[in-house]
Amino acid sequence: ILTVGSLLAEGIKHIKGFDGLDMESSAFFAAAERSGIAAVGIYVISDQPSIKPFYTITKKEQAAIAASIRDLIPIVTTL
């Protein structure tokens, strides 16, 4: 997963060859780096914008995403 702050700032060429694109956590990682704090990102992939946007997911898919997040909580809190 490629994490960028802005597609305009990073340039479109950099997004090729990645399975995912994240634009929300770049500020988190930048702040952690600047503060000298280790950081990790755990992602739940909920949609594929060019194939199946988030607003088209079914109730069953929404439930599966919610269950995935619930299952991650005990794992994340032990890191």
Image: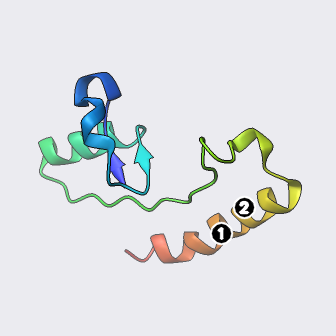
Q: Quadrant of the N terminus?
A: bottom left
Residue 49 lies, in percent from the top left, at 60, 42
* Coloration mode: rainbow
Q: CA distance from mark 1 to mark 2?
A: 5 Å
Q: Is 46 rendered above or below residue 30?
A: below
- Residue drawn at point x = 46 percent, y = 71 percent: 77
Q: Residues within 10 Å of mark 2 (few under 14, many from 20)?
A: some
Picture quadrant where residue 38 is located: bottom left
Residue 30 lies, in percent from the top left, at 22, 40
Q: Is 53 rendered above or below residue 59?
A: above
Res 6 visible: no
- Residue drawn at point x = 56 percent, y = 71 percent: 72
Q: Quadrant of the C terminus?
A: bottom left
Task: Give the amino acid at mark 2.
Answer: Ala
- Whether residues under marks 1 and 2 lie with C-beta atoms below 8 angstroms apart, the answer is yes
- Residue drawn at point x = 13 percent, y = 41 percent: 34
- Residue drawn at point x = 79 percent, y = 43 percent: 56
Residue 19 lies, in percent from the top left, at 42, 57
**Circle 2 SS class:** helix
21 vs 47, left or right, is left
Q: Which residue is mark 1?
A: 68
75 vs 4, left or right, is right
Residue 8 lies, in percent from the top left, at 30, 22
What is the residue that sits farthest to the right in this orientation? 59
Picture quadrant where residue 12 is located: top left
Q: Is 47 rendered above or below residue 42?
A: above
**Circle 1 SS class:** helix
Task: Give the amino acid at mark 1.
Answer: Ser
Q: Residues within 10 Å of mark 1 (few under 14, many from 20)?
A: few
Q: Which residue is mark 2?
A: 66
Res 41 visible: yes
Name the residue nearer the viewer: 74 or 44.
44
